[in-house]
Image (cartoon, rainbow, N blue to C red):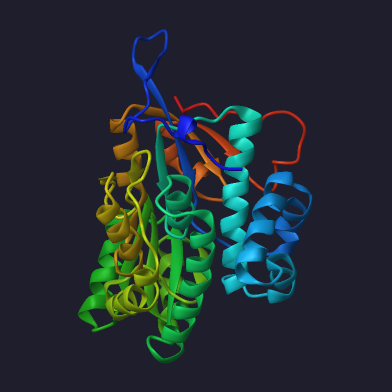
Amino acid sequence: MGRTEAQAGGSPIAPAVERDSGRASRTAVLFPGMGRFDFASAGRFLVLDRYARARLAVADEVLGFSVLERFHDAGADYSEYAQLAFLIASLAAADRAEDRFGMRPDVCAGASFGQKAAAAYAGSLDFPDVVRMTAELARCEKEYFTTEHSDVVTHAVYRVPDEEFHALLDEMRARGDWFEISGELDRGFYMVSLPESRLEDFIRAVRDLGGYSMYTMRPPVHARAFGALRRKAEAEVFTKYRIKAPRLPVISDADGTVVESAEAMRTMLLDTFDRAIHWPAMVTSMAGLGVDTLHVTGADDMFHRLNCTARAFDVLTVNPKNALRPGPPKLRSRAA
């Protein structure tokens, strides 16, 4: 289960494979951020997939309870048990991609919640430790948002005209409305944190611009206003764990920085609390390293579909929906 030292390689970036064009070709693995995730969509994979069962067995022993049973009963999209199940499903998908489909990535990336799986896959955290950390961070966040920013949500919008959208944000700012951009995912695709009391007005204004609403996250994520949560997580959770240097380059989801040291990995994991994610910067960084094939391992309805992803990479997805189907996953070639 998981990557061996031989697979990880001894150099920061594994030897490149030359294509007919003569251009260096490298592969990356992406652990996606967590969207809506429940037992109905992932339960069959977790029950039947041998890689998932192996991961679950370790997690159950570490935690002292059945993750699968509690995930089945949880209900809430972002509950502690849904987060644990999402982590396990993401790493099990990577195990399957390695063992069954020959995935050998040169670069690793994790967007938002996917950073935890990326840290484990890259060897910065042992799998038992990342399981414990995930559970403890879920409880830490729940405790924090019970008393702080309890009225704030993060809402995703897409296909908004950029100039008009930023004019809308300027109007909100001029009125004294609090908000923060918590993520930029593609042209016209943003995550915005704001008070829930203002959410309906915001959705209506986005619709008037011709944009669409995607989903709302509770609790909210990735905002400078949550600096106290970062400090709480660092003091109460991160001090318990030894974070090591990654065995292969990891791409920061805040700005696309290449993470290669233990301290930089620790900073990246903490940045998720109070820094917005920027997927286009991650795409640019991976492309700059010579990546042209991207494996997306885990439940993902978004990152592999984004225009900037499709333009930059050939994409293969291994997820709870397709992992149990016969044959290898279908390659989506880059858009012309």
Confirm whether residue 226 shows in the render: yes
- Is residue 183 rendered to the left or right of residue 89? left
Which residue is found at the position 47% from the left and 43% from the top? 30
Point 41% across, 30% down: residue: 9
**Position of 162 compared to 63: left or right?**
left
Instruction: Indicate left or right for 155 with 276 as reference.
Output: right
Q: Is residue 262 above or below residue 220?
A: above
Q: Nearer the viewer, residue 19 or 136?
A: 136
User: Which quadrant does the N terminus fall into?
Assistant: top right
- 127 over 191 or under it: above or below: above
Instruction: Quadrant for the C terminus, please.
Output: top left
Q: Is residue 305 above or below residue 254?
A: above
Residue with the most extreme left position:
174
Q: Residue 208: x, y in percent?
A: 43, 66
Report the number of discs: 0
Tell me what residue is drawn at x 37 percent, y 20 percent.
Answer: 16
Task: Specify the farthest residue to the bottom.
Answer: 147
Tell me: 322 left or right of 229: right
Residue 307 point in image, percent of width and height: 44, 40
Q: Is residue 13 above or below residue 154?
A: above
* x, y percent for residue 125: 43, 55
- Residue 330: x and y in percent read 64, 30
Q: Is residue 211 visible?
A: no
